Image (cartoon, rainbow, N blue to C red):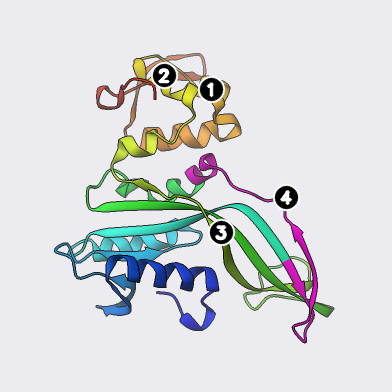
């Protein structure tokens, strides 16, 4: 459950957008939980907006799935713009952050919800966005309310909002998640036997071990043999497809 007192503009904008899009109502109680958006369609779809930490939603999803279809909306920040203001809310400066995410970074989030990725009642919608973060420059270094900083800094985050949005990606069913992998990786779905290093070479980069972990956990791949300390796999028959 989100406390709307701490709700960012990013979360609020998406919540209101999807409530209007699907004819739902926002902040609806359901048992001991609050749904971001509850739709009146036959499946009584619950729409949850989760800007980061998809794993935090898993307990809530597992409770709601008994009576609802679940649709999670997750913004993927491709461009990050930082605006600084003083403590009187006067604009100071604006810059682009070197931080940005790609579809491969999404696999970090997927690891936390792997038990439900293949479920037909679960849909994940990814929205690539450009995001503006408002930071307040302070006169003295400060700690955050949650005490999460190892060292105090002379700024704190005030808000995040959407600058622009790209076309969303709808994921439903295990094949749709495997389709996110790079084009060269898709060629392995013809029955090719591969290891983690092969995934790295096909464009998965340093995410290769995380991606392979997820593929094993969701049973998208099966073990074939082991040579020394290296294990080899191939995609299961259900996921052996033509390249895109």
N-term-proximal mark, 1 vs 2: 2
- Pick the residue in front: 162 or 153: 162
Residue located at (54% from left, 30% from top): 204
Label 4 to label 1: alpha-carbon separation:
25 Å
In depth, the one of 84 and 57 nearer the eye is 84
Q: Secondary structure at mark 4?
A: loop
Q: Is residue 227 magenta?
A: no
- For label 3, count other residues whose C-alpha is less than 10 Å away and answer few (under 14), some (14-19) or many (20+): few
> SS of the residue at dot 1?
helix
Tell me if label 1 and label 2 are in contact, CB under 8 Å. yes
Q: Earlier in the sequence, mark 4 or mark 1?
A: 4
Residue 233 visible in the shown view:
no
Measured in 3D between alpha carbons, the distance from the residue under mark 3 to the one under mark 1, in whole angstroms, is 31 Å
Going by the image, does 98 lie left or right of 206?
right
Residue 116 seen in this snapshot: yes
| Front of the two marks 3 and 2 | 3
- In the image, 52 versus 133, the foreground residue is 133
The N terminus: image quadrant: bottom left
Residue 104 among those drawn in magenta: yes
Residue at label 3?
A: 164
Q: Secondary structure at mark 2?
A: helix
Residue depicted at 22% across the width and 53% down the height: 121
Give the residue number, with chain letter if any, for mark 1: 202
Q: Name which quarter of the figure residue 21 lies in.
A: bottom left
Q: Residue at x 51, y 76 (%)?
A: 7
**Cα separation between marks 3 and 2:** 35 Å
The stretch of residues the image draws in magenta is 83-107
Task: Report the disc number at residue 98.
Answer: 4
């Amino acid at each position: 459950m989100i406390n709307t007192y701490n709700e960012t503009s990013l979360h609020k904008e998406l919540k209101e957008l999807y409530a209007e899009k699907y004819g739902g109502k926002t902040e609806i109680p359901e048992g001991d939980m609050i749904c971001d958006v509850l739709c009146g369609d036959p499946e009584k779809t619950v729409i949850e907006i989760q800007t980061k930490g998809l794993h935090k939603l898993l307990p809530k999803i597992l409770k709601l799935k008994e009576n609802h279809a679940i649709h999670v909306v997750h913004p993927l920040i491709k461009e990050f713009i930082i605006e600084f203001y003083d403590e009187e809310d006067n604009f100071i400066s604006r810059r682009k952050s070197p931080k940005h995410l790609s579809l491969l970074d999404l696999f970090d989030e997927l690891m936390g919800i792997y038990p439900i990725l293949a479920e037909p009642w679960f849909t994940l919608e990814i929205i690539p966005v450009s995001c503006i973060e408002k930071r307040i420059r302070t006169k003295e270094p400060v700690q955050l309310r949650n005490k999460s900083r190892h060292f105090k800094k002379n700024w704190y985050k005030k808000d995040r909002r959407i600058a622009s949005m790209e076309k969303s990606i709808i994921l439903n069913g295990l094949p749709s998640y495997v389709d996110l992998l790079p084009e060269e990786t898709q060629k392995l779905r013809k029955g090719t036997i591969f290891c983690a290093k092969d995934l790295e070479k096909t464009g998965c980069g340093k995410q290769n071990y995380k991606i392979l972990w997820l593929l094993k956990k969701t049973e998208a791949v099966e073990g074939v043999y082991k040579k020394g300390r290296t294990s080899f796999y191939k995609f299961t028959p259900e996921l052996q497809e033509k390249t895109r």
